[in-house]
Image (spheres, grey):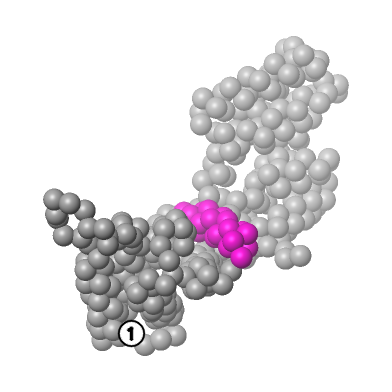
Amino acid sequence: MRVGARILKTGIALILALLVCRWFDLKPPVIAAIAATLSIEPTVYRTLKSLKEQMEANLIGAILGITATYFLGAEPLVVGIVVMLVIIINLRLKLESSLVLSVVTVIAVMETTEGSYLYFAGNRFLLTVIGVFSAAVVNALFIPPHYERRLFKEISETGEKFSILMRTLIHNQMEEKVFREEKDKIKSNFKTMDQLYDLYTEEVTKLRKFTYSGQKKRVIFKQMMTVLHKEMDMLRTFERHIYSSFQPGHHLFPLIQSQLEALTEYHKNILLTYDGILKPREDWHLPDEILRENNQLLHSFMTLYPEVKDTPDPKDDGQWRHLFPVVAEILEYANQLERLSKLVHTFHNHQGEEE
């Protein structure tokens, strides 16, 4: 089982909160530990943002809890009403992410009315504050996130999966059940990529000086994801039309196979170029061989289109209607790859000028 950075940071924050409580002899330390666990965030920016929100929510819970207990006592009915009131106030103030911590604070400060209640409530409030700050320190200083590399890795791995699926689909080499399972896995990868892209955007735009290089990288990553979405569109289109609507023995079939393999290889080379493994090409346009096959595919398809006649041609089997979306997807895929190539080419040229 893999232990992720967030799990590790949660453990470190909890340890830090418990140590601080031990150093200052604050009890019970479990409240600080709970607050630290609830306060871990995936990015430094979200840590700083949530710190403010959590302190506000924590303060709301403490004030209402202390006031209610002082005047009304700590009966279960009173605690329940105060918790509902705290939830309503937090929702009104758009502090939804800190709701649980605020409720924990209310319950902690309303635990008893015996003895020096204000001292007791202040101690419980301090424990939650220690937990929140322990999480903030760990988030900011330990294992800083590197979402750029994680995002690029996710994009590269998903692109490789698409390449395999496209090749097996066009050659009819994979069982239908296995194919659908692999396609569902890729769909879940899209959700991960979207989350990583949002986290990466926060990381480069909120906490750093937003440079030209950072802006270009954001655009490149967005186009990389657009290309992957186009590949998913191709898979759906091919599933619908390749084998259900016309025979693989059709004379255009080998050309479609060849062009898809060339385009997926070109896609892989663009990613390797961005990663610095391959040298940038002299220009960003589609390679000549891909352009030639694009033109050949389009020309061969157009010859299938029947001429307008008063009476239908009995030799026309209508397969051109099913080939049309297939050819259109291939040409659009090539266009999206060319745009990605242009962005990567421009980025590398700019990097060279900066150096």
- The residue tagged 1 is 280
- Disc 1 secondary structure class: loop
* Residue 44, horizontal then vertical, whole percent: 54, 56
Q: Is the magenta stretch mostly helix, strand or loop?
A: helix
Instruction: Classify 10 Å Cα crowding around label 1: few (below 14), some (14-19), many (20 and above).
Output: some
Residue 197 lies within the magenta run: yes
Q: Which of 123 and 304 is in front in this view?
A: 304
- As drawn, the residue found furthest toward the right would be 114
Magenta-colored span? 175-198
Residue at the image position 71 percent from the left and 40 percent from the top: 128
| Residue 223 seen by the camera | no
* Residue 310, horizontal then vertical, whole percent: 13, 50
* Picture quarter with the N terminus: bottom right
Side of 146 relative to 276 (left or right): right
Quick check: 127 above or below 109? below
Picture quadrant of residue 69: top right
Picture quadrant of residue 211: bottom left
> Mark 1 is on which residue type?
Pro
Q: Which of 82 and 219 is in front in this view?
A: 219
Residue at the image position 75 percent from the left and 52 percent from the top: 14
Q: Which of 245 and 296 is in front in this view?
A: 245
